[in-house]
Image (cartoon, rainbow, N blue to C red):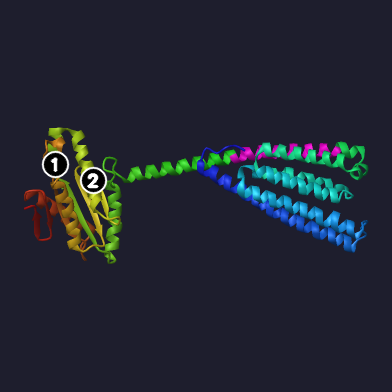
Amino acid sequence: MMKSSNPIFAHLEHINQHQWIRNFLSTYWFVVFIHFIAQLGSFLFLDYEATPYHFYVHILIVPTLGMMAMILWAEWVQRKRQSHSYYALFLTSTFITWMIIYLNYDIRIITALCLIPIFSAVIFFKRRLLWISSILQIVAFAALYLADPHFQTFLTSFDVVSIPAFIMGGTFVAHVIVTSGSEILSNLHQTMQSKQELIVHNAIMSKMSKTDGLTNLYNQVSFKDYYETAYDYASQGVTLHLALLDIDNFKQINDTYGHRVGDMVLGIVAQVIQQYISSSDIAARYGGEEFALLIFDKQFDEAYELVENIRSHLAGLKWKELDNQTVTVSVGLHSCEPGLSKEQLFEQVDQYLYQAKRSGKNRTVTAGSIHSIA
């Protein structure tokens, strides 16, 4: 069977194949039971040429116990020696098949049962197991033929040649099935792997289309979509606060220390923002050095404390890339209130941000008040 390059597929194949082994062993118990009932019924209700002792001992009890012992052995191998469970399965299958053939060889078509172990190997799509099973059937036939004179006299010369030929012909048919099935399975795996890769690619592209590559926050386009949805929820009673944060003197940082340092500053600011917001809040890089926050399910004082924690955290950092200077942000914050459209809410917060910039920077402006560092 073709080996899957995907470890998940390989693990599933392993589980499925051993599940099939358990299913076969359960079926063999059923076959032995049915054979027992059929033999007993034939003896009791049909003209059966055997004495009661010979029938019950040599035809019913001893063969049944032998077949049951083989199934029990195969089940033990399945539990304790899983790497050999395939061989145990086909040895058991061969033993049961030829025991039934031996007990009923007066039914000429009964020898066709020898194809059952061969075609059962098709389930596993393993050519090696297929040919092992085929060889076991020929060996079992030869052993039975050489060991039992009654079996020899029952078969014609044509039977001696045709039964092995019949086994080989069935094996070649099963081999074609396995080969075709392996190709189909290989194509299926490749299709599923391509589908997985496409799903991953689409997920990456979707994330890239929604997020800012530098900060890993949502970009302006996706923020606007979330903002409209959030405003609709707020109109239905959900608590919503909008905050805009802008890095102070960012152009000076870029002009003095270069855009590489400026990009690093943007990334660190984004990390600090993500550190303080909850999983239900939404943060975005709105444009340039400006960030936008949608804060849900908090009282205004809690929302204010959140943005103040971000602001004060950043104000306390010393940047060796900026000659141990600090980077500060100005913040505007306002709550969504009844009668306030989403455009008006955004404009109001933008005005508060502008006031924070004009009144000294590094501070948070809210409705009717200015909060700054001491």
10 Å neighbourhood of mark 2: few (<14), some, or many (≥20)?
many
Mark 1, residue position: 318
**Image quarter hosting the N terminus:** top right
Q: Nearer the viewer, residue 299 or 358?
A: 299
User: Is residue 322 rendered to the left or right of residue 170?
Assistant: left
Q: Label 1 sits on what residue type?
A: Lys
Name which residue type carries label 2. Answer: Ala
Residue 51 lies, in percent from the top left, at 92, 58
- Tell whether position 180 is magenta: yes
9 to the left or right of 328: right
Q: Secondary structure at mark 2?
A: helix
* Range covered by the magenta-colored residues: 162-185
Q: Earlier in the sequence, mark 2 or mark 1?
A: 2
User: Disc 2 vs disc 1: which is toward the camera?
Assistant: 1
Q: Is disc 1 placed on a helix, strand or loop? A: loop
Picture residue at 67% right of the left edge, 36% below the top: 128
345 w.r.t. 180: above or below:
below
Residue at figure coordinates x 74%, y 54% from the top left: 68
Q: Position of residue 204 (x, y in %)?
A: 38, 42
Residue labelled with disc 2:
270
Mark 1 is surrounded, within 10 Å at the Cα level, by few (under 14), some (14 to 19) or many (20 or more) other residues, namely few
Q: Quadrant of residue 144?
A: top right
